[in-house]
Amino acid sequence: MAFAKAQPAVIAQNGRAPGPRGVSFVWRLIRAPNGWLDFLSECQRQYGNVVSFRFLGVPACLINDPAGIERVLVTDHQNFTKSMDYRALSRVLGQGLLTSEGEFWKRQRRLVQPAFFRDRILSYGGLMTSYTARLMETWQDGEVRDVHRDMMRVTLKIAARSLFNVEIDGEAGTIGKALTVVMDEMPKLAGFAFLPDWVPVPGLGAFRRALADLDKIVYGIIRARRATGEHPGDLLDMLLDARDESGAGMSDLQLRDEVMTLLLAGHETTANTLAWTLYLLAQNPEQQSRLATEVRTVLDGRPAEASGLQRLPYTQMALMEAQRLYPPAWAIGRKALRDFEVSGYRICAGTNIVISQWVLHRDPLLYPNPERFEPERWREETAGRRSLPKFAYLPFGAGPRVCVGASLALTESALVLATLMQRFRFLLASDEPVQAFPSVTLRPKHGLRLRVERLR
Ligand code: HEM
């Protein structure tokens, strides 16, 4: 099947991409129940795959065409830097791998990359399944639980232990609370990112306090390692041993930024993937029972192993499908350094480019019945999967800035999900749909409550 290109419903004038104009646009954004998610989807439906608009005076352009996305993220990536939203993010992550640029970023990426090589990831498998098993020991048959909170706790413990060799227990609650404050306030901060840092923004007090809590824990991890003088050969070791050309090691601030980035980026997104997957399985009992049957038949009561995941294809397809419908990174932002052209439209230097996985992954021209949860659509041999354009599915981004933790995240999600499905069934606790909140990541707005039933 060949995919038709979405035609702009409104033809642009002077090569400028069509899009909403004037104050009515801000109105539409404010009124949309799911904010940016609804607004961007509506823009694409109404104006096509390249949509220009201004947000608080800043020129922006949504690109939803896979070929245009490839140009921005891969072929012409030198023509773009990270967009202004990352400035808000750097209030939390400083100059860590996600937010830094240029030569500094390149050096840090080279340094961090070996921690994510296949052998390392395989070696983390045992602790992923044992932390999940320990979490389920506290669950009561038939109770209603906030599974988003549960997944946040377990993925945080896994990230802290696998990357930095630390046990996080009491701190997990503090980190969870602080992160919720940070995530709640972040969209506001991103909206005011064009203002200098000294301008007061409402909610900043709570944000600063939450950040201080996170800092205390991260500096604690660094100090504790320095004090022991041990060298377990983990990621923290690599960061502590790194030297620049002059032979200088990283300052405490640089270390803090990298540890904070990897700890937060490394658990929040994976927790969201797992929570949304459980929600979709609870909504689709037939698919859930297929997954449970696969896990039961293949594992036969044994713990899942990282090296044996290819024997759990349905589990992996369910995760891929959940990341299509609820991409934890729901948008990627870039800023154009020079003018460029996409799909016949001229985009000026200085424009903020928005690539939204939420919009892309629900495009009916790419995915038939886009709202339906159909893990089978990811079977290798299906025609739909084979003819899908390369840049039509982007949970982890693409190009040089592609997620460094993608393989770790995929292994971890599959192991945690398989372990959960060995012991429990997940049921909807209410008919109310769970609302998605587009902060830095796509989180459930008020948690995600499901009934858990022990399998006999
Ligand atoms: C399901 C889980 C995950 C998703 C959906 C996800 C998504 C993404 C995306 C879309 C990007 C690219 C952002 C951009 O281009 O601007 C990214 C970058 C990044 N991710 Fe992930 N991520 C996940 C898990 C992880 C894990 C487990 C880690 C580390 C332990 C991690 C660390 C990072 C870092 C450090 C970057 C910046 C890479 C760079 O610019 O060099 N992520 N992630």
Image: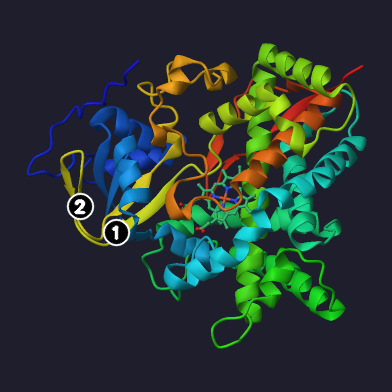
Q: Which residue is mark 2?
A: 340
Residue 338 picture location, percent across and down: 22, 60
* Residue 103 visible to the viewer: yes
Q: Quadrant of residue 320?
A: top right
175 to the left or right of 2: right
Q: Residue at x 13, y 32 (%)?
A: 11
* Residue 180 visible to the viewer: no
Above/below status of 189 relative to 390:
below
Q: Residue at x 36, y 37 (%)?
A: 40
Residue 12 picture location, percent across and down: 12, 37
- Between 286 and 379, the residue placed more toward the observer is 379
Above/below status of 231 relative to 72:
below
- Between 21 and 424, the residue placed more toward the observer is 424
Image quadrant holding the C terminus, namely top right
- Residue type beneath disc 1: Asn
- Residue sticking out furthest to the left: 14
Image quadrant holding the N terminus, namely top left
Residue 349 picture location, percent across and down: 22, 59
Q: Which residue is mark 1?
A: 79
| Label 1, ligand 1: CB separation under 8 Å | no
Q: Quadrant of residue 26?
A: top left
- Between 159 and 31, the residue placed more toward the observer is 159
- Categorize mark 2 by other alpha carbons within 10 Å: few (<14), some (14-19), many (20+): some
Residue 361 picture location, percent across and down: 45, 30
* Residues marked 2 and 1 touching at CB (< 8 Å): yes
